[in-house]
Image (tube, rainbow, N blue to C red):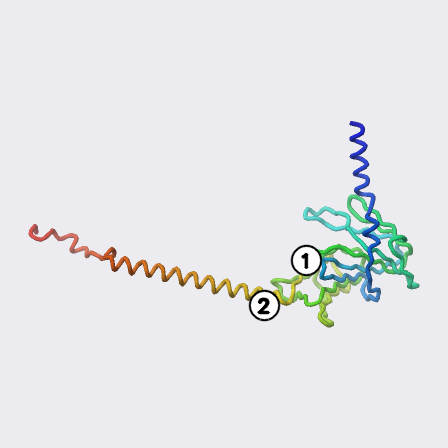
Amino acid sequence: MGVVLVVVTSGCLGAFGGVSQERLCEEADYDWNKTANATYRVSDDNTYQAVYEVNNTSSMELHTRDGLGNDDPLEISSVKFRAEDGTVYDCEDIDVETTRHETIVEFPEENGQFAYTAESPPKRFGTQRFVDGSHEVILPPDREISNPIFGSVQPSGYDVSRPGDQVHIRWDDADGRRISVQYYLKRDIPLFFGIVTVAGIAALAGIAYYYRLVRGLERRREEAGLDVDVDDDDRRDPPPGMG
């Protein structure tokens, strides 16, 4: 029993204490030329790059929230830190640890920019707010949010620009604790209405076929004499010769 307890305990400690150094050191190119305090560039491969302005702070706590409202550590990779003098530190100089509810990042300097990569579900981006001030989300090319049936943005109070073929969503001061964007491919709209049109035509064809089938059955019944009506007066009169 003692051996089992030691194994289980050490397993729990390992689960929340370590982060894959290989993932933290994965190569990534970041655009450090940002004007927002937090910038998120969403990619086609279901990942996003986050770049934060770091001012007079030595660490950052990162977490995500599950469906039950519980905080879980955010899984990150490709960490880098750019100091004010332009020096870029990689994973070897950035201390990253996880607890049961968050990922704790220790910076090599207190001022600069911190960047990481994380996963994002298809056609949806969401993150907790980890810094104050302005936030910007940059969607992949050929994506849109303008149709309210397929796209949505939270919180409100944002501005949208479209330089080139990418949508930029910006909050000068985002309210709330979370940013959420649901977007779609531009071709999704005509594809959706095309599917709806085909389904509508198929439904009308089915109704027309059913109507013709019923009418055909009615005609055959009439031809067979199964629908000959008998007047009520005839039913009340006795048979010939008995009146």
Mark 1 is on which residue type?
A: Pro
Q: Residue 146 location, x and y as percent?
A: 65, 67
**Labels 1 and 2: the sequence-earlier one:** 1
How many numbered discs?
2
Q: In this orientation, which residue lies closer to the viewer: 186 or 39?
A: 186
Q: Which residue is mark 1?
A: 122
Indicate whether 132 appears above or below 5: below
Q: Residue 103 location, x and y as percent?
A: 81, 49
Name the mark on residue 100.
Answer: none
Q: Secondary structure at mark 2?
A: helix
In which quadrant is the N terminus drawn?
Answer: top right
For this orientation, the residue located farthest to the right is: 85
Side (left or right) of 10 relative to 156: right
- How many angstroms separate mark 1 from mark 2 (CA)? 19 Å
Side (left or right) of 186 relative to 71: left
Q: Residue 214 location, x and y as percent?
A: 35, 59
Q: Secondary structure at mark 1?
A: loop
Q: Which residue is mark 2?
A: 190
Asked if residue 177 shows in the view, the reply is no
Side (left or right) of 145 relative to 9: left
Q: Residue 28 location, x and y as percent?
A: 82, 59
